[in-house]
Amino acid sequence: ALWGAFAKGFELAQSSPADVEQWIVVLTDGANNVFNGVDGAKIAALASEREARIIAISVGSATNAEDMKKICGNASAKGHLSKHIPVSASPQGVDEAFKMVAQLLNARVTSLSIADGLVAIADANGSITVCNIDGVKIWSHQSGTAGGWMVRADARSAYQGNDNGILRFNLRNGNMESQCPFGNAVLSGCQTPDSLFSAAGSNVYWFSKMNNNVAAVASVAPAIILANAAGMVDNQVHLFTADSSSTISCFPWNPNTPTTLHAAKWRLSCSDIGTPLSMQVFGNRLFVATTKGVLASIDISPAATAAGAPTIACAVKTANIDGEATVPLQKLPTTNDASQGVVVECQRELNDNELLDIHRAIHGANVDHVIVRGKNYPVEVAPAKKLRFVIISNMKFIEQNPAKAGKYGQMSRSGHKITWCISGHSPRWGLIVDDQVQSNVCPLKMRILSDGFNKNWDVQFPVIENSQRTLGAKFVVQQIFPAENGEYYRVVNNNYKQFG
């Protein structure tokens, strides 16, 4: 009586606390009849109305697989993370399915991609967020659907794969540039400089970054692709997939005939090591991480695949780790010679003089803007309380509300000019009273001291020990270049020394 149990699940979800996630997990072989007037169509309608996340596992050739797909699709369209998982009718198939269930139940951040010093993040709620080098959000977009299982970024665009297909955004400002529906949820993706390869359902879809053309170029039907990768093998692009039948497949792809649907060049069973959920090509090796906690290396060179499918060259079972892992950082060498490099210094994002410029603009009569580090920022007025404020980066500078009780409200009413700095980087508020900066809570940034560079730009600096990242600390780096995607510099390599 699957349909009756399904209806009961929605009933229980309705009566549960609103702030607790509600999940309905269903396992079916398709042998279900109408129960008390409830059938697949009725459950699909409930999925469009009720508040619940759904995972439906269809075993073997379940006759109700299309019903399950529609039910999960309706729940996703309502903004609830839901997935239909078809698996083989075997203990291994069911075992792999429930490992995927565990992943879904715990998923929040589902994919990351780094491009030119910016990080793009996709989450299980269907959002994509891009942050800068300091983790400050540049923009965020809610796609209106649950699930955001893929994100890839290059110097120009960010690509999100969700339950509806691919969305393309401008990496700098978050403007949506195109959307391409696939009819299936995108679960993974990889990219080359000119193309994006996204796995949705049983197919790998080619997406042209040049003109947004889309075509299915590989298929593992009836299995579902859970991970994919692309790499050069023998001077030709090859696509690799891992699917729900615990099989890795290899497909050739030719950029001169990009829309051609290719047959598999070879297939490799990986049931002994588990189903890969992540894969990456490096040189002539395909690396996979599986549901059994195995990291495996597969030789995909022409010599290894001349007779067909390759063998797994190396597989390592990861151990359970208790406690916290720490990475020891070496003590930095020091130098007094800056002739062979560029000197950078750890500074406040805004120094005290710049804070005073902002303070005076906020309290100045008929002042409507302030120029800080060559940029113009408007002085705005909060509509409710008529308080003047300025927003710079992740910081808000706002005048003291004279109507407030307490010490600073009284000081404001007595004629003192008071400005608060609310920073997303610090739990403390910065404070300026009259012409004195009493507390500067602006975050620390790396800036260039050497001549020949824009000294208003930040420097994306390698991770160093907190004890070394102190106000006024100086370092010498060998080479710096401007980022493609913003007004900041990047360090070419991690060869740097403490200066002075």
Image: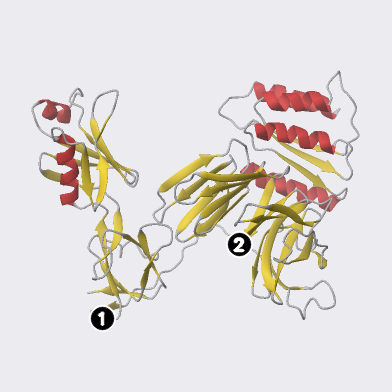
Q: Which one is in front, 38 or 91?
A: 38
Q: Residue at x 12, y 25 (%)?
A: 413
Residue linked to disc 2: 194
Secondary structure under tag 1 reads loop
Q: Amino acid at mark 1?
A: Ser
Looking at the image, residue 481 lies above or below residue 7: below
**Dividing the picture into quarters, in which one does residue 48 lie?**
top right
| Residue 217 visible | yes
Measure the alpha-carbon separation of dots 1 and 2. 40 Å
Q: Position of residue 407 (x, y in %)?
A: 15, 29
Q: Position of residue 62 (x, y in %)?
A: 88, 40
Relative to 458, is 211 on the left or the right?
right
Residue linked to disc 1: 339
Mark 2: few/some/many CA within 10 Å (<14, 14-19, 20+): few
- Of the two numbered discs 1 and 2 on the same chain, state the one appearing first in sequence: 2
| Residue 316 visible | no
Q: Residue at x 53, y 58 (%)?
A: 154
All told, the count of numbered labels is: 2
Q: Quadrant of the N terminus?
A: top right
Secondary structure under tag 2 reads loop
Residue that protrudes farthest toward the top in the picture = 36
**Dividing the picture into quarters, in which one does residue 2 lie?**
top right
For discs 1 and 2, the disc positioned in front in the rendered view: 2
Q: Position of residue 287 (x, y in %)?
A: 67, 67
Relative to 424, is 92 on the left or the right?
right
Q: Amino acid at mark 2?
A: Asp
Q: Quadrant of the C terminus?
A: bottom left
Mark 1: few/some/many CA within 10 Å (<14, 14-19, 20+): few
Looking at the image, residue 488 lies above or below residue 57: below
Q: Which one is in front, 466 or 155?
A: 155
Relative to 332, is 248 on the left or the right?
right
Q: Position of residue 147 (x, y in %)?
A: 63, 42
